[in-house]
Amino acid sequence: MKRRGLLAAVASLFACAGMPVGHATLNPFPLSASDLAAVARAERHVDSISTLRARFTQIANNGSVTSGVFYMSRPGKMRLEYDPPLNDLIVSDGLFIFHWDDELAQQSQQLVDDNLANVLLRERFRLSGDVTVVGVLQSPNGVLEITVADTEEPKAGRITLVFEQAPMRLMRWRVVDAHGLTTRIKLHNVRTGMPLDRDLFVFRKPRNRR
């Protein structure tokens, strides 16, 4: 299967800019008092994360499964290393998101602010303003799902962040892009608050690991 370029690769984590979009008015989603409180808890939780390291499993729309390691250092920085035989790499240094497509032997980049990756990476995690909450689901088993879209370009895609509420933690997310394709990411063995090497967030062409 041919691997995808920068925008689609980053979309595996977050809805991304650069897709075919059109301006439309978001249908107001009525948030109950319970919904508002749940969104506020999620905001406080992500805001409390300075650094994060986790294994991840990615399930593409066609059912293919890949895995790797996800690093995040807020604000602005993240890194995705895919497990062999993939040798792709995605790095955000706080200003740009870089992607190395090993199959094409090609590096691409995009401003972080032009991508909804900035939702999690920004200094203050807020699900309002340039993004709008378009759905909240609180399950009896304690799982919270919050779906957001770009306020000005809602057709660009939607992200659903999934939290466990007791204790509050980010477990997974799924993305529906502008073409209706769904990608799911699940986090495993999540650790937070540890020191991370600054070099993790400097883009360098990865060595061939095959």
Image (tube, rainbow, N blue to C red):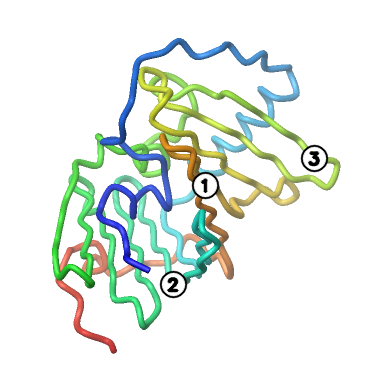
Residue found farthest to the bottom: 210
Mark drawn on residue 139: 3
**N-term-proximal mark, 1 vs 2:** 2
* Numbered disc in front, either 1 or 3: 1
Residue found farthest to the front: 1
Q: In the image, is 163 to the left or to the right of 75? A: right
The reply to whether discs 1 and 2 touch (Cβ–Cβ < 8 Å) is: no
Q: Around disc 3, counting alpha carbons within 10 Å, would you say few (fewer than 14), some (14 to 19), or many (20 or more)?
A: few
Callout 1 amino acid: Thr
Q: Which one is nearer the viewer's eye here, 163 or 15?
A: 15
Task: Label 3: state its secondary structure.
Answer: loop
Label 2 vs label 3: CA separation?
29 Å
Residue designated by label 1:
182
**N-term-proximal mark, 2 vs 3:** 2
State the quadrant of the C terminus: bottom left
Q: Position of residue 20 (x, y in %)?
A: 31, 30
Label 1 vs label 3: CA separation?
21 Å
Q: Which one is nearer the viewer's eye here, 94 or 180?
A: 180
So how many labels did they put on this image? Answer: 3
Residue designated by label 2:
68
Residue at the spot 42% in from the left edge and 53% down from the top edge: 12
Residue at the spot 65% in from the left edge and 46% down from the top edge: 163
Q: Position of residue 200 (x, y in %)?
A: 26, 68
Q: Position of residue 142 (x, y in %)?
A: 79, 45
Task: Label 2: state its secondary structure.
Answer: strand
